[in-house]
Image: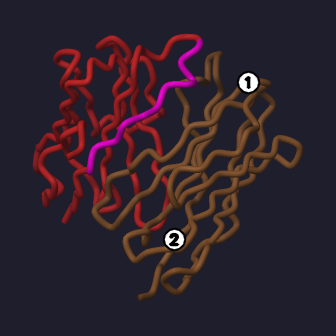
Amino acid sequence: DTEVTQTPKHLVMGMTNKKSLKCEQHMGHRAMYWYKQKAKKPPELMFVYSYEKLSINESVPSRFSPECPNSSLLNLHLHALQPEDSALYLCASSQGGTGFSSGANVLTFGAGSRLTVL
Amino acid sequence: AQKVTQAQTEISVVEKEDVTLDCVYETRDTTYYLFWYKQPPSGELVFLIRRNSFDEQNEISGRYSWNFQKSTSSFNFTITASQVVDSAVYFCALRPYSGAGSYQLTFGKGTKLSVIP
């Protein structure tokens, strides 16, 4: 069983809908990440939270809005998406935060939420 | 700038054959970490190994082994006696140990391995 849980596993939404993706971990990790993965491509980083604060936003369009309510939860709110936003959205977490020497930390990934925008 | 190259896009082998997945990287950092992840069709990225840039010892874990050669900037992954369950996409990734970019995990494009029974 994965230690990072993502819901829902599959989501189909229209371009005018508002939906949310959820991610939960109970490993005490203090860094949490959202990645987007298109078919046959590697994951692309979207956002990073470190100690519940947004530390990295990789120039993601505002129709994606992340939220970290507490150290165990990470949400991705979706609004007015485009068909090209259809992808697998992966959540990950790692120990500590994203401080100066955090490069050794292993990212643990969830199974992803497969999003289809019609 | 960092870059990870996995030149093999797709590999097919017959079960029980050995297979090596290549990974070549570029970085200006002196201390960095290299990773391999497996992504089966279910979608989850599964962590396989982490290696720091100062540790050039090869590592073996069951049927898996890794050959890190700093002189050629390569971190190759060998599966011995492949099994159908090894079918997946394998990603090599690089992360600087420290500095402003240490949050960033740079992935290669992945190698899709198909093991045929």
Instruction: Work out which quarter of the rendered image holds the C terminus of chain B and state it.
Output: bottom left
Q: Residues within 10 Å of mark 1 (few under 14, many from 20)?
A: some
Disc 1 secondary structure class: loop
Identify which residue, A98 or A48, lies in the foreground: A98
At 48% across and 47% down in the image, what residue appears?
A: B48
Q: Which residue is mark 1?
A: B31
Residue A113 in picture, x, y percent from top left: 22, 52
Q: Which chain is brown?
A: B
Please state if B35 lies on the left or on the right of B56 as rendered: left
At 24% across and 44% down in the image, what residue appears?
A: A2
Residue B16 in picture, x, y percent from top left: 52, 80
Chain for mark 2?
B
Q: How many marks?
A: 2
Disc 2 secondary structure class: strand
Identify which residue, A23 or A20, lies in the foreground: A23
Q: Amino acid at mark 2?
A: Lys
At 39% across and 26% down in the image, what residue appears?
A: A94
Instruction: Work out which quarter of the rendered image holds the N terminus of chain B and state it.
Output: top right
In the rendered structure, which segment of residues is drawn in magenta?
A: A101-111
Q: Is residue A109 magenta?
A: yes
Q: Earlier in the sequence, mark 2 or mark 1?
A: 1
Would you place residue A106 above or below residue B24 in this image?
above
Q: Amino acid at mark 1?
A: Thr
Q: Which residue is mark 2?
A: B112
Please state if A6 lies on the left or on the right of A45 as rendered: left
Residue B63 in picture, x, y percent from top left: 52, 61
Identify which residue, A72 or A8, lies in the foreground: A72
Chain for mark 1?
B
* Visual hue assigned to chain A: red
Would you place residue A41 above or below residue B32 in this image?
below
Secondary structure mostly seen in magenta is loop
Name the disc covering residue A52, or none. Answer: none
